[in-house]
Image: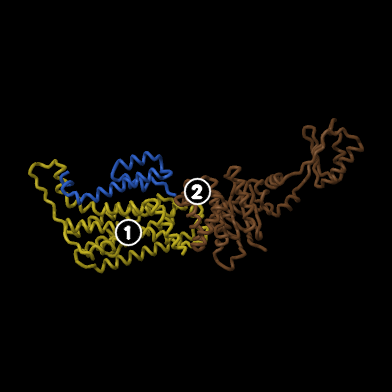
Chain colours: A yellow, B brown, C blue
């Protein structure tokens, strides 16, 4: 009951501050940018001009899975950045303005307070991703060749797990750090450090969350979901839950006041 | 019966002790003023009572805490500078607060409706975004959210400090009314506000309780009378005679006026007037001033 | 430009999204009580680039 109240408040807030409008649109934009530019690259180069007369631009033929991988790369950088930027202030902002005082002086459990935020941002991010990947899937089918509905679901679901981790990490830092800017800084830094570590120890860290995109690609090429993808997704989701639980624990111990 | 009992409450930040071993106790349906100069530790004390801050040491006991582990159900709190979700309307925020305090949807709506009327937020403003509210409206909305779940203890941090005289009056009247339903604990640095509506005073300075008790008792305790006497002559000639009187505590002369302090007005008046009449003093002024609680406040804080 | 006109049905969604983002941003700037910094700056930002509306939503909206 109380949890639903908090969730509804979060959803209404993100509706009124227009996140429910612009975030899905931006994710859709990011998802169709690459199929289009990849497909039309020769013509674009041509129309820009500057090529000597008679130059034939040879572009490699792209398989659907390759274009998916390029787009997931885009969503892993710009998409992740946007997810971090929309989530970062959810706790620090309320604490800074002082609203959290009026909320937490009521018999509100810290678990409800933070998990409602977590779920509300996951709903927003998953919904945006759904529309983004759906439109992406449509473009792939028109421009590059057949990609089945199951494959669409695979991309959507497993990349959603990655974004779930990003939301969880951001909320974790938001309950630990006091300044909104630092939340973004630490979250991005952590993701970059993780990707570096995954790169360096790639033979040991088979199931690092950073590998999700690669395993999605592998699954599309293989024509079935590879077991590495399931395991990595499971681990990533597990870490996300762990981050959520620790956020609540740390938040509980923290003093609410700044002065 | 005791509603709240605070023992040896202490809060330190690093080496700085903000609240230093406070003992407070008060009962139901009281209006208690926590008074002290700025920086005395009032806000910190209230925040600990509201459960927003963990005490470094000491204990806070609530009468109802045996029934539930979460004492926040019995407390309403309004900070000095309340912040709201300003994207909500006043009504939405109240309903939201009510539901957080575990009221059902219907109850929360009903209470929100009642309170919007009670604290005087106009019909048009009720469904307007809080970002458009004035300071006074926000303060009243703040009180409404604090009492939406009918708490037993209402904690208000400097509720009238930031208001203009009209807003101040409105809030004081509202508090007067609320006093009948719950205990109010409020902080202020203005003695007038405290005197006006509180039954009990707790005087705080440097994180310590300096004096506390019923307003009437404190008034009596610190009440002294000052009699002003002026004569058409050199006043110093008369000082000794006055000093010899039994009811007189002490005297001082300032600009030819003799100030006579006494803790027993009737006797002092009788003795002095007797003297004046029998010895035929050329008296030009004889007046009696009662010292106010303000003097006591200054005296206690300065000592 | 030929690429665009010949394949308009493919590029149309892109353009529609841009336009919607722009309109929502402008309406929001006008209706909101305060922005971070003067409102007219954000109107210009929204006009300037395709990223403008997004930059406004992330940095221009005052959190409350």
**Is B175 left or right of A214, judged from the image as shown?**
right
Q: Residue furthest front?
A: B123
User: Is residue A82 in sight in this rendering?
Assistant: yes
Residue labelled with disc 2:
B125
Q: Residue furthest right?
A: B278
Residue A150 image offset from top left, x and y in percent? 23, 66
Q: How many marks?
A: 2
Q: Residue furthest top?
A: B233
Callout 2: SS: helix
Residue B189 image offset from top left, x and y in percent? 63, 46
- Circles 1 and 2 on the same subunit: no
Looking at the picture, tell me which residue is in the foreground, A185 or A57: A57
**Residue shown at the point (69%, 52%) measured from the top left:** B211
**Residue shown at the point (76%, 47%) measured from the top left:** B223
- Location of residue A93 with respect to A223 vertically, above or below: above
**Residue shown at the point (27%, 66%) measured from the top left:** A229
Looking at the picture, tell me which residue is in the foreground, C12 or A160: C12
**Is A148 left or right of B13, judged from the image as shown?**
left
Callout 1: SS: helix
**Dot 2: chain letter:** B
Q: Nearer the viewer, mark 1 or mark 2?
A: 2
The mark found on residue C24 in the picture is: none
Residue labelled with disc 1:
A127
Residue B241 image offset from top left, x and y in percent? 88, 39
Looking at the picture, tell me which residue is in the foreground, B65 or B115: B115
Alpha carbon separation for disc pair 1 and 2: 35 Å
**Is A191 left or right of B143, judged from the image as shown?**
left
**Dot 1: chain letter:** A
User: Is residue A98 in sight in this rendering?
Assistant: no
Residue B218 image offset from top left, x and y in percent? 73, 51
Q: Residue furthest left?
A: A54
């Amino acid at each position: 009951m109380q949890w639903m109240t908090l969730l509804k408040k979060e959803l209404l807030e993100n509706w009124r501050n227009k996140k429910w409008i612009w975030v899905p649109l931006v994710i859709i934009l990011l998802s169709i940018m690459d199929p289009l530019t990849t497909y039309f690259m020769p013509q674009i180069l041509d129309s820009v001009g500057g090529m000597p007369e008679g130059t034939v631009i040879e572009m490699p033929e792209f398989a659907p899975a390759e274009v998916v991988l390029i787009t997931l790369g885009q969503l892993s950088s710009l998409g992740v950045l946007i997810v971090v930027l929309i989530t970062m202030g959810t706790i620090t902002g309320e604490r800074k303005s002082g609203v959290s005082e009026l909320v937490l002086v009521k018999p509100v459990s810290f678990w409800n307070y933070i998990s409602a935020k977590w779920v509300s941002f996951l709903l927003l991010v998953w919904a945006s991703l759904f529309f983004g990947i759906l439109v992406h899937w449509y473009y792939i089918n028109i421009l590059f060749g057949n990609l089945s509905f199951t494959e669409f679901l695979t991309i959507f679901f497993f990349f959603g797990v990655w974004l779930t981790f990003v939301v969880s990490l951001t909320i974790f830092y938001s309950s630990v750090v006091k300044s909104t800017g630092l939340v973004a800084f630490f979250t991005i830094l952590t993701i970059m450090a993780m990707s570096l570590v995954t790169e360096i120890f790639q033979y040991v860290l088979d199931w690092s969350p950073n590998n999700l995109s690669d395993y999605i690609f592998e699954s599309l090429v293989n024509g079935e979901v590879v077991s590495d993808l399931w395991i990595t997704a499971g681990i990533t989701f597990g870490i996300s839950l762990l981050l959520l639980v620790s956020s609540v624990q740390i938040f509980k111990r923290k003093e609410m006041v700044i002065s | 019966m005791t509603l709240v009992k605070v023992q040896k409450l202490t809060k330190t930040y690093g080496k700085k002790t903000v609240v230093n071993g406070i003992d407070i106790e008060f009962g139901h349906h009281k209006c208690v003023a926590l008074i002290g100069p700025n920086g005395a530790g009032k806000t910190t004390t209230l925040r600990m009572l509201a459960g927003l801050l963990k005490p470094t040491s000491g204990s806070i006991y609530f009468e109802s805490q045996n029934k539930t582990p979460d004492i926040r159900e019995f407390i309403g709190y309004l900070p000095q500078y309340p912040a709201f979700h300003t994207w909500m309307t006043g009504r939405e925020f109240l309903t939201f607060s009510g539901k957080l305090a575990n009221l059902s949807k219907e109850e929360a709506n009903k209470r929100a409706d009642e309170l919007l009327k009670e604290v005087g937020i106009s019909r048009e403003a009720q469904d307007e975004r809080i970002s458009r509210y004035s300071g006074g409206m926000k303060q009243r909305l703040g009180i409404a959210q604090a009492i939406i779940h009918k708490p037993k203890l209402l904690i208000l941090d400097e509720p009238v400090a930031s208001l203009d005289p009209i807003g101040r009056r409105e809030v004081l009247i509202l508090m007067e009314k609320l006093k009948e339903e719950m205990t109010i604990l409020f902080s202020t640095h203005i003695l007038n506000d405290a005197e006006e509506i509180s039954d009990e005073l707790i005087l705080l300075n440097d994180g310590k309780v300096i004096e506390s008790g019923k307003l009437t008792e404190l008034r009596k305790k610190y009440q002294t009378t000052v009699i002003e006497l002026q004569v058409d002559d050199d006043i110093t000639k008369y000082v000794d005679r006055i000093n010899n009187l039994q009811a007189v505590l002490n005297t001082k002369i300032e600009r030819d006026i003799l100030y006579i302090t006494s803790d027993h007005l009737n006797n002092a008046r009788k003795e002095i007037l007797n003297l004046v009449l029998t010895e035929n003093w050329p008296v030009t002024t004889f007046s009696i001033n009662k010292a106010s609680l303000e003097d006591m406040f200054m005296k206690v804080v300065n000592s | 430009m030929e690429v665009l006109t010949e394949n308009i049905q493919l590029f149309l969604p892109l353009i529609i999204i841009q336009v919607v983002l722009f309109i929502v941003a402008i309406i929001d700037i006008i209706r909101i009580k305060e922005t971070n910094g003067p409102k007219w700056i954000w109107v210009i930002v929204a006009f300037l680039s395709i990223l403008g509306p997004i930059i406004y939503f992330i940095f221009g909206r005052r959190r409350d």
